[in-house]
Amino acid sequence: MHAFNLQPKPLSLAERLADMAVDALIDEADLSPKPALVDRRGNGAHTDLHLGLMHASALSLWPAFKEMAQAASEFGEVGLPLREAIGLIGREGEQAMLATTHGVNTHRGAIWALGLLVTAAALEPESTAPGAIALRAARLALLDDRYAPHPLSHGAQVAQRYGARGAREEAQLGFPAVIQRALPQLKHSRAAGHGEQNARLDALLAIMSSLADTCVLYRAGETGLQTMQLGAQAVLEAGGSASLAGRRRLHRLDEQLIALNASPGGAADLLAACLFLDRIESGDSIIQGVF
Ligand SMILES: CC(C)(COP(=O)(O)OP(=O)(O)OC[C@H]1O[C@@H](n2cnc3c(N)ncnc32)[C@H](O)[C@@H]1O)[C@@H](O)C(=O)NCCC(=O)NCCS
Ligand SMILES: Nc1ncnc2c1ncn2[C@@H]1O[C@H](COP(=O)(O)OP(=O)(O)OP(=O)(O)O)[C@@H](O)[C@H]1O
């Protein structure tokens, strides 16, 4: 008689990277209190989003992230064939997201940022430094996908009006908001003993203090963007989200942004990207699957 084999099947590299991307999205959504964004307290400035929808949307993207990582292994190098393959998978991922959310945009920007980073991580699994992964992602983002549609998206409208190039430019520059702002702040706040949730909030605030977030520009113009950037900077200068003074300012920023309908969705996407890269760097081996 054969005994059942109860050993779990080891996950492939692509499956582990997809797990990590989805985990990063769920951690971002759950993090609270985020100013004007969907979190465990409520819907922030959004009428069509809620936490359950963010979770369902994140889970619906797992196959797309896995396929992007598989495409990286198959093509093996940064180039137009890989860029166009992940563009197609990303667009299919968007359709899966929209089918799950009944047409609501929950993670469009996140598919773009995390899709590029998952692909870049899968290309060289031994190279786990965030800066190196972000640079490979930038080289992919700089390639022009001939099949990408060019709708008059909110980002495109904001680009015409204010000259902000949003998600595309952030990726093409190698995610400076993540590499130069969020990750250093995350490590600084952890080292100061602020606790993991506060460190993550501080990382979000570090992104918000300088990002030209096209979600905010579209919804609340330059006034909204300035309120976000100065308000986030003020929280950090007051001692960050772990301090009493910082918490008071964070609460005020939440009220101000909600009053302006200014939800920093782009900053939220980049926090998820930051958590993804942090997880890879911190030794959650993507090669051996030691979690
Ligand atoms: C480049 C993308 C993000 C489109 O950008 P665009 O600015 O035109 O679109 P849109 O207004 O819908 O905004 C996208 C999202 O980016 C995020 N975002 C906003 N500002 C920023 C910023 N400064 N930095 C990073 N992300 C940002 C927000 O979440 C926003 O909702 C991407 O979705 C795309 O290329 N779509 C085309 C379809 C496709 O090929 N998808 C697959 C890509 S792998
Ligand atoms: N926790 C979060 N709360 C709200 N938005 C988030 C969150 N995390 C990420 N986002 C990002 O914010 C974007 C949604 O913002 P927004 O609703 O302004 O998009 P839109 O479709 O351009 O605008 P609108 O809903 O006003 O038509 C998504 O692309 C998503 O990636």
Image (tube, rainbow, N blue to C red):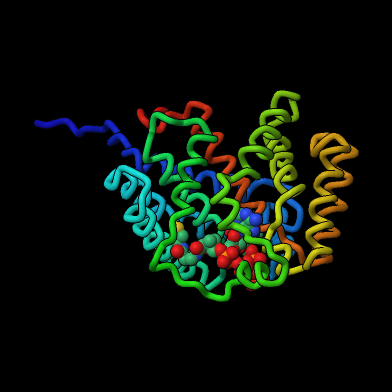
Residue 243 screen position, x and y as percent: 85, 34
Number of dots carrying numbers: 0
Please tell me in which quarter of the rendered image ligand 2 is found: bottom right
Quarter of the image holding residue 144?
Answer: bottom left
Residue name at image x 54 percent, y 55 percent: 110
Residue visible at 57% across and 76% down in the picture? 152
Q: Quadrant of the N terminus?
A: top left
The residue depicted at 56 percent of the width and 70 percent of the height is 104
Q: Position of residue 198 (x, y in %)?
A: 73, 37
Question: In screen coordinates, is 28 left or right of 147?
Answer: right
Q: Position of residue 116 (x, y in %)?
A: 46, 50
Measuring from the top left, give residue 50's x and y in whole percent.
63, 62
The one nearer the camera, 8 or 162, is: 162
Question: Is residue 233 visible to us here?
Answer: yes
Please, is residue 272 above or below residue 11 in the view? below
Residue 108 appears in the figure? no
Task: Give residue 189's quadrant in the image.
Answer: top right
Left/right placement of residue 7 relative to residue 236 reads left
User: 92 or 134, which is in the foreground?
Assistant: 134
